[in-house]
């Protein structure tokens, strides 16, 4: 192996400690990103279930079932309603 290749391989292995050598996060940062992704997916699932009038299938207290979507899960995904929907003046 050439010196350049050896240095490159050593740099990849001993580089950034928050990376596993391929640029992806590792350790606590990885667990936090997976947790954020799962929470985002659950919120989206509750929103879609609300919009379509269906239930969300998940395990609650060890009992698997289809439950009504929880508004607390998706309320931050829905834009707030207009405060004033009146039209004041329309030019024609």
Image (tube, rainbow, N blue to C red):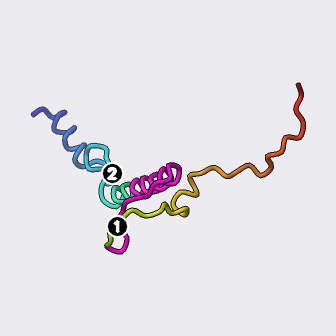
Q: Report which quarter residue 2 is drawn in.
A: top left
Residue that numbered label 1 is attached to = 59
Dominant secondary structure, magenta: helix
Where does the image place residue 31, in percent across and percent down from the top left?
34, 59
The mark found on residue 25 in the picture is: 2
Tell me: residue 60, above or below residue 88: below
Q: Give the magenta range.
A: 36-62
Quadrant location of the N terminus in the rendered image: top left
Give the secondary structure at mark 2. Answer: loop
Where does the image place residue 73, in percent across and percent down from the top left?
51, 61
Where does the image place residue 24, in percent across and percent down from the top left?
31, 47
Quadrant location of the C terminus in the rendered image: top right
| Residue that extends furthest to the left in the rendered view of this protein | 1
Give the secondary structure at mark 1. Answer: strand
The mark found on residue 23 in the picture is: none
Q: On the picture, is 41 further left or further right than 17?
A: right
């Amino acid at each position: 192996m050439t010196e350049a290749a050896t240095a490159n391989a050593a740099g990849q292995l001993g580089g950034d400690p928050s990376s596993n050598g391929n640029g992806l996060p590792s350790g606590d940062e990885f667990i936090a990103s997976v947790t954020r992704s799962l929470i985002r997916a659950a919120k989206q699932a509750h929103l879609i279930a609300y919009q379509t009038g269906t239930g969300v299938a998940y395990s609650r207290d060890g009992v698997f079932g289809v439950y009504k979507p929880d508004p607390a899960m998706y309320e931050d995904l829905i834009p707030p309603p207009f405060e004033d929907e009146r039209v004041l003046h329309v030019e024609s």
